[in-house]
Image (tube, rainbow, N blue to C red):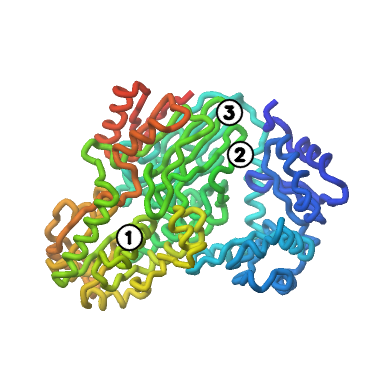
């Protein structure tokens, strides 16, 4: 009998029978996808961890041990006592509490010392405070957004508890219908790049994969996912899974909350932080342009409250017949391949989101081994035969020579980048090349928004590629804090930079506005990432010669675009055509069906074609609003 057909009462009974009486269990409750066992003596279950491990093996559900709120030490007292238990050499930099989980979040420079030998120090903290420690390495650069989110979750801990309980009750509801009839409906991002949204349905449940916007369009029928599709019913939605923080994958998510969604959002922890940053920035940019966003900051906060971060590799029940696992996709920090295991061995789907099947400075390549996979949904941003990217080293050298030439003629280099991903990759390259004397030394200005995203990167070294991670953790060198970099916090500083001496400016696309940079033909704009059809970047890339821009007085004027335009492809966080083909061929086990998405129509077709013809695998390219029966 599948574990899910057990009732809540039966599961609780089972757990109670296997836990020693002296642990004094007070209640067992759902906590999102896990069962929380509340006890007056949490130390017993933490020290004898095999007790819980045995139960997990039997019932195949995640169990977390929580202290009963009545035995927890007052937060102020716990905050005073913890530094007395831990050696001062651990250099604790922050102690915060999460009452909804009964956790104390300890930030320290030396996590090993807070854990202690065989967890001895940690257990001592549990015994003395009855708060369960979550130990984090103090990030070298502190992030405002991480601090705000933590503070918000603390202040709303009662509401968070309610959400987690409701989510758990829904996940573990008894399955009514038998498994089968697995369908996929294309809501956005099919035969196009932007507004990614895929609905996966079984007879029992409904899961939405990504919920993005198309930044290249203002027409609602093209800018947002087609939530008006007959198959989509917000009230029946069990879960939303977000592959990564780029707005074309998560920019429309808060809208669901505005319209009453009360369910969970699953993603990696870095994705949760980065997407909050990008959604808030999106609202800010729209309001500066005098446009009315479709949701507000309140809805972004609701999203935070409903987000359940998952580690790569953790198998999680998200509906009575669906288990979710996230794996590294190599695209940006925290980006995930989404693996769905449907109906106890019935069908397995992998949705790649955006992925890179090659190592970069920042990240390891996408994971290609799965326990099972029958259907794979792949992106195809660079899927045409012309999209072969130059070698990494070739791209780096080209970047260095374009920068050197521009600086030599007294010009400025503008590198527009999405704040997350390419920005950090380019920062690492520029720092490395300057350090080795291969790049002329010049001030490098980094826009404030990018700096905040960079801070989030340093909070998650375990998600970064081995080289950077080791350099941050063990080498004591943080390449993101290079002396060459100057952070531009205030918009007022922009004007000085634009009028000042030669420099390198790494900024989100807004920096070009105002005109002077665009008019000076000594300057160069270097595109290092994909420019979505309809955006200003794409128009400049295609050779636009003049454009209306908002000048420093806030008036619209027509500006001549005289600066040099360069596009260097090799830095992309996407796989090029060769990497897409290699990846799909190396995915283990071999998928039976390929669905090609997230590419201009011709590119989707071209990728599908090669698999159909050369590798004899069923490959399809659905249109938006189309439904495909997977099984
Ligand atoms: Zn992306």
Element carrying mark 2: strand
Label 1 element class: helix
Name the residue rendered at 42%, 47% in the picture.
Answer: 330
Residue 378 in the figure: left or right of residue 168 = left
Mark sitting earlier along the chain (2/1): 2
Q: Residue 74's spot in the image, x, y percent?
A: 75, 69
Residue drawn where x is 78% and y is 65% of the image: 128
Q: Earlier in the sequence, mark 3 or mark 2?
A: 2
Q: Which residue is mark 2?
A: 317
Q: Which residue is mark 3?
A: 343
Mark pair 2, 1: CA separation = 40 Å
Instruction: For label 3, count other residues whose C-alpha is less than 10 Å away and answer few (under 14), some (14-19) or many (20+).
Output: many
Residue 448 showing in the rendered view: yes
Mark 3 residue CB less than 8 A from any atom of ligand 1:
no
Tell me which corner region of the image, top left, top right, bottom left or bottom right, holds residue 356. Answer: top left
In this rendering, the label closer to the viewer, 1 or 3: 1
* Residue at mark 1: 429
Q: Secondary structure at mark 3?
A: loop
Mark 2 burial class by Cα count in 10 Å: few <14, some 14-19, many 20+ = many
């Amino acid at each position: 009998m599948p574990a899910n057909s057990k009732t809540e009462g039966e599961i609780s009974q089972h757990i109670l029978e296997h836990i020693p009486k002296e642990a004094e269990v007070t209640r067992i409750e759902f906590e999102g996808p896990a069962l929380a066992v509340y006890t007056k003596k949490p130390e017993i279950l933490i020290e004898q961890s095999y007790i819980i491990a045995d139960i997990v093996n039997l019932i195949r559900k995640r169990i977390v041990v929580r202290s009963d709120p009545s035995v927890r030490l007052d937060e102020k007292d716990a905050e005073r006592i913890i530094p007395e238990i831990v050696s001062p050499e651990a250099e604790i930099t922050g102690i915060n509490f999460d009452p909804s989980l009964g956790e104390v979040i300890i930030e320290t420079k030396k996590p090993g010392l807070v854990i202690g030998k065989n967890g001895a120090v940690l257990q001592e903290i549990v015994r003395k405070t009855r708060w369960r420690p979550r130990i984090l390495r103090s990030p070298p650069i502190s992030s405002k957004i991480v601090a705000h989110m933590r503070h918000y979750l603390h202040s709303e801990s009662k509401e968070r508890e309610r959400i987690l309980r409701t989510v758990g009750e829904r996940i573990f509801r008894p399955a009514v219908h038998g498994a089968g009839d697995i369908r996929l409906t294309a809501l956005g991002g099919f035969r196009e790049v932007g507004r990614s949204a895929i609905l996966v349905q079984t007879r029992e449940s409904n899961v939405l994969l990504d919920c993005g916007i198309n930044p290249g369009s203002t027409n609602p029928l093209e800018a947002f996912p087609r939530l008006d599709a007959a198959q989509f019913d917000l009230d029946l939605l069990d879960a939303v899974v977000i592959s990564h923080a780029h707005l074309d994958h998560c920019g429309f998510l808060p809208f669901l909350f505005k319209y009453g969604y009360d369910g969970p959002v699953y993603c990696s922890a870095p994705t949760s932080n980065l997407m909050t940053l990008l959604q808030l920035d999106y609202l800010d940019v729209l309001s500066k342009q005098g446009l009315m966003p479709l949701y507000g900051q309140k809805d972004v906060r609701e999203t935070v409250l409903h987000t359940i971060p998952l580690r790569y590799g953790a198998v999680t029940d998200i509906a009575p017949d669906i288990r979710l696992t996230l794996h590294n996709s190599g695209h940006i920090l925290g980006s995930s391949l989404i693996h769905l295991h449907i109906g106890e061995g019935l069908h397995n789907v992998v949705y790649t989101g955006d992925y890179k099947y090659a190592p970069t400075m920042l990240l390891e390549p996408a994971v290609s081994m799965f326990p099972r996979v029958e259907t794979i949904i792949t992106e195809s941003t660079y899927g045409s035969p012309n999209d072969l990217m130059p070698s990494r080293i070739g791209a780096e050298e080209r970047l260095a020579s374009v920068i050197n030439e521009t600086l030599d003629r007294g010009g400025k280099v503008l590198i527009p980048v999405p704040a997350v991903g390419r920005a950090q990759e380019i920062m690492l390259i520029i720092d490395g090349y300057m350090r080795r004397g291969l790049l002329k030394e010049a001030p490098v200005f980094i826009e404030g928004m990018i700096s905040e995203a960079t801070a989030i990167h340093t909070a998650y070294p375990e998600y970064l590629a081995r080289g950077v991670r080791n350099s941050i953790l063990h080498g004591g060198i943080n390449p993101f804090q290079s002396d060459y970099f100057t952070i531009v916090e205030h918009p007022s500083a922009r004007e000085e930079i634009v009028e000042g001496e030669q420099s390198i400016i790494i900024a989100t696309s807004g920096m070009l506005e105002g005109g002077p940079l665009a008019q000076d033909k000594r300057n160069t704009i270097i595109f290092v990432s994909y420019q979505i059809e309809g955006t200003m970047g794409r128009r400049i890339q295609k050779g636009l010669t003049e454009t209306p821009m908002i000048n420093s007085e806030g008036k619209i004027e027509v500006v001549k675009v005289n600066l040099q335009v360069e596009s260097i492809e090799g830095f992309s966080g996407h796989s090029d055509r060769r990497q897409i083909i290699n990846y799909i061929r190396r995915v283990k086990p071999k998928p039976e069906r390929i669905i090609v998405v997230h590419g201009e129509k011709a590119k989707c077709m071209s990728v599908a074609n090669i698999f159909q013809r050369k590798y004899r695998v069923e490959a399809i390219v659905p249109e938006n609003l189309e439904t495909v029966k997977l099984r």
